[in-house]
Image (cartoon, rainbow, N blue to C red):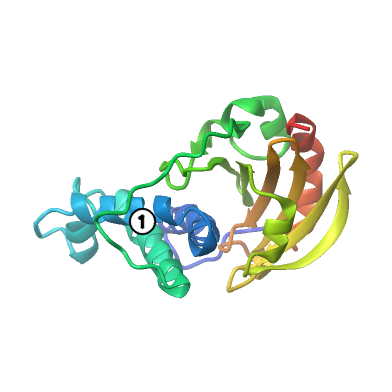
Amino acid sequence: MIGRTMKPNYAAWRIDLADKWAQRAPAAVAIAITWGLEAAVRFVLQTIAEAPEPHGGGPVQADLCPSGGVEESIRRHVIATAICTALQAAGYRLTSGATPTAETTALWDPSTGIPADALRASNVDASSSESGIAGIEQIGWRICGWRGPEYSITVYSTARTVDQFENKPGNVDFTDVTIAGRSGRQFRLDGASKHLNCNVVFAAQQGVVQLQVLIRAALDNPPEPCGPLARIGENLVPWFPE
């Protein structure tokens, strides 16, 4: 843990839960604003369709969680809210007729392409693997994330290009980097969590592979995230497709 401690005055499970789902929000927004809108719509409509009649479980649980479980309730609340906000910013209207169109490009899958030893060397729990965003697969993407005591790691695989990443609103502070002998473009996601996230994209034959590190907001004195990103990349980037 390098001497860092959790912020006091919060139950440990609440801190862990908040960090866990805060991890998903930047990814949801990043995809929903300009890419994968149909997939975002599908998630929101699915959430609405599954909402039961109020059953006394509290407003979040009653509206968003069929099973009444607190974690599932928060998951749906955080992700649906993030996506709805991004869709609104993009001027996209939710309609029940929205039908996603599958992309046929075969993409490298980080959930099967990165060995457990490389993840453990990166100080994340290999068993915490989660594909997609909050378990929902995204059309045109292969996504997998893992959690550790100080940060979470997410790897994105897509047919999009580095230029598209650079021209995407909200991606800022681009700079050239070399990690594990491979040239990439490092950047941040603008917004409230800018100081906690660092990203790098690598051009590949399929399009792009992106590595993201998100520092846990609950840490006292959270570290600057691009240092851990470089160290983690030394373990993971050799497994990325060329």
Looking at the rendered structure, the secondary structure element under dot 1 is helix
Q: Is residue 97 visible?
A: yes
x, y percentage for residue 20? 48, 52
Tell whether 75 sits left or right of 208.
left
Up-down relation of residue 193 to residue 209 (above or below): below
x, y percentage for residue 15? 47, 58
Please give the name of the residue rendered at 64% of the width and 48% of the height, measured from the top-left corner: 160
Up-down relation of residue 34 to residue 202 (above or below): below
Tell whether 127 sits left or right of 184.
left
Please give the name of the residue rendered at 55% of the width and 65% of the height, measured from the top-left corner: 7
Work out which quarter of the rendered image holds the C terminus and state it. top right
Q: Which kind of residue does numbered mark 1 sit on?
A: Val
- The residue pinned by badge 1 equals 41
Up-down relation of residue 21 to residue 85 (above or below): above
Residue nearer the viewer, 128 or 191: 191
x, y percentage for residue 123? 68, 40
Q: Circle 1: is it few (<14), some (14-19), or many (20+) Cα within 10 Å? A: many
Q: Quadrant of residue 137?
A: top left
Tell whether 168 sits left or right of 70.
right
Q: Quadrant of residue 126?
A: top right
Q: Is residue 223 visible?
A: no
